[in-house]
Amino acid sequence: MKTTETAIFGESKFMMKKFLPDKITSFVTSGFLSKVKERDVKLLPDSGPKPTLQLPNRQTPYDQYRRNKLIKLLKMHELAGGKSVLEIGCGVGDLLLEISKFKPRELYGVDSDPEMIGFAQQLLEGIEVDLLAADVRRLPFPEKSFDVVVVMFELQYILDKHQLQQVVHEICRLSRQWIVLVEDTSPEGKKEEDHLRRPMETYKEAFKKERFYLRRTDFLDVSASEYVFTGKSNPWHWIRWFLSPLLYLMGFPKELMRPPVAENELPDSKFALFLQKLSLPFMTSLDEIVKSGSGTTIMRFERERLFRRG
């Protein structure tokens, strides 16, 4: 790894090892995730708390499916090969690790938290990457320094529209051509507990002001499988209640009757994980039928072409 001085300007264990190097697994098993969850990581001093892991934490077969689908939709193989790439809000560097597989000419990661940069340095040991702790509003790079700038799940935590435009300006300043933006969106706009699901049109207009135009949009359509496999509106509670007397009479221990009760909670039995893996192909096939048109949205913006062709 290239050694880079950490300049401060302001401010997931998978079941199948073949998808993750052992060093990521060791992060999880050593208590890294619990440490992350105890912290409030902020992109800006007065923005809301945001998750530190940029890619979904791969704990269950469903988490694995969702993460792999998101990586495919990013289509970084089309953009990163032989190019200079910057990720803003890199967290522990898990997305940088994926991008490095496409052999970019240069790879940079920036995060507002020096501690996350420390974790990323451990995760990316042996990979040619420069890491920096810096305030995204004043990044220490010249204009048009990178071919591709990637931002994942960051802007939705900036609630103030003026701050949003300020950060969009800085992101656009650094990109020579492409910006890949991943955020949770909603057609009507929706305020969550700690972030704002803006309409996609809001991001489109914000980047248009900086002469960047939306060229491609993809949705991470997982609404059918998410309904079953996460804690959001989870019908498993009713099914468990209905079947629990029969399971109890058959001699099943109580822990086999407990599905996950909260998002990202790992089921407490191998049997529950087996059932999830068994039913996953059917549920994920429904994801290709049930299209929500909202949720996690992958947007690809391009700098204005010659003669102001949008």
Image (tube, helix red, strand yellow):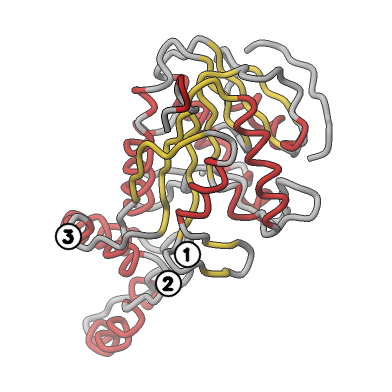
Question: Mark 2 or mark 3: which is in front?
Answer: 3
**Image coords of residue 207 (percent x, y):** 55, 41
Q: Please give the name of the residue rendered at 57% of the width and 30% of the height, measured from the top-left corner.
A: 87
What residue is disc 2 on?
232
Q: Secondary structure at mark 3?
A: loop
Q: Which numbered disc flags the more N-terminal residue, 1 or 3?
A: 1
What is the x, y in percent for residue 160? 70, 58
- Residue drawn 46% across the image and 48% down it: 56
Residue 260 percent across, percent down from the top left: 42, 68
- Report, in whole angstroms, how far the alpha carbon at label 1 lies from the one at label 2: 7 Å
Compared to 116, does 178 lie above or below?
above
Q: Is disc 3 surrounded by few (<14), some (14 to 19) or many (20+) residues within 10 Å?
A: few
The image quadrant where one finds the C terminus is top left
Q: Residues within 10 Å of mark 2 (few under 14, many from 20)?
A: few
Q: Residues within 10 Å of mark 1 (few under 14, many from 20)?
A: few
Three-letter amino acid code of the residue under disc 3: Ile
Q: Amino acid at mark 1?
A: Glu
Q: Which residue is mark 3?
A: 289
- Work out whether mark 2 precedes mark 3 in sequence or the reverse, and give the earlier one: 2
Say if mark 1 contacts mark 2, CB within 8 Å: yes
Q: Secondary structure at mark 2?
A: loop
Which residue lies under the disc numbered 1?
263
The answer to whether 306 is drawn above or below residue 184 in the figure is: above
Residue sitting farthest toward the front: 307
Q: Of residues 202 and 141, which is closer to you in this image?
A: 202
Kind of residue sitting beneath label 2: Lys
Above or below residue 263? Residue 110 is: above
